[in-house]
Amino acid sequence: MFNVTSFVGADRKQRELKEAFLAEATAVKGFAARGFSFTFIPPRAQHFGGLWEAAVKSAKHHIVRVIGNALLTAEKLTTLLAEVKAILNSRPLVPLSQDPNDGEALRIRWCIC
């Protein structure tokens, strides 16, 4: 058996995950027993996806523009995804009034306090 510290740490983490899984095994089995139901849209018919396909397109647009051909570390990628999420969540959802001259709109505001 190897006695390298990274293997010791990985072994400890694996044991922790196993214990956590076994503690929740009944709930997981109950969830899995209900079964799964997938709903698929036809291939090459993204317009069937509507809003979520538009959200994926917007996120992909921002990510591709920033990354280009660069290789990112996990930390930089996490930061980029958080920034893209903030950009997409700052978009207006619906107007607050029927008046076309009113520029106020309902937006999602995130506060990390």
Image (spheres, rainbow, N blue to C red):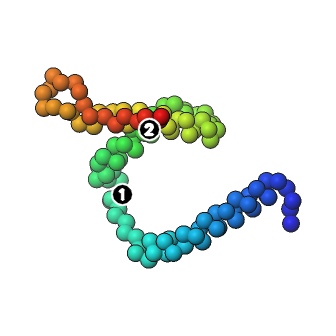
Q: Looking at this view, is 105 or 73 the one in front?
A: 105
Q: Nearer the viewer, mark 1 or mark 2?
A: 2
Residue at 86% x, 62% y is 2
Q: Amino acid at mark 2?
A: Lys
Quarter the N terminus occupies: bottom right
Give the crowd class for mark 1: few <14, some 14-19, many >=20 residues within 10 Å: few
User: Which label belongs to residue 110?
Assistant: none
Tell me residue 3's x, y (percent).
Answer: 87, 59
Depth check: 35 or 43 in front?
35
Q: Position of residue 22 (x, y in %)?
A: 60, 71
Give me the residue at 35% from left, 62% from top.
40
Q: Which residue is labeled 1 in the image?
A: 43
Against 90, residue 5 (above or below) is below
- Identify residue type, mark 1: Pro
Q: Position of residue 66 (x, y in %)?
A: 51, 31
Question: Which type of secondary structure does the marked residue at label 2 adopt?
Answer: helix
Q: Residues within 10 Å of mark 2 (few under 14, many from 20)?
A: few
Q: Quadrant of residue 37?
A: bottom left
Q: Are marks 1 and 2 in contact (CB under 8 Å)?
A: no
Residue 75: in sight, yes or no?
yes
The residue tagged 2 is: 85
Instruction: Using the rendered view, name the quadrant where residue 78 is placed.
Output: top right
- Kindly give the residue lying farthest to the top in the view shown: 101
Separation of residues labelled 1 and 2 (CA atoms): 27 Å
The residue at the point 23 percent across, 36 percent down is 94
Between discs 1 and 2, the one toward the N terminus: 1
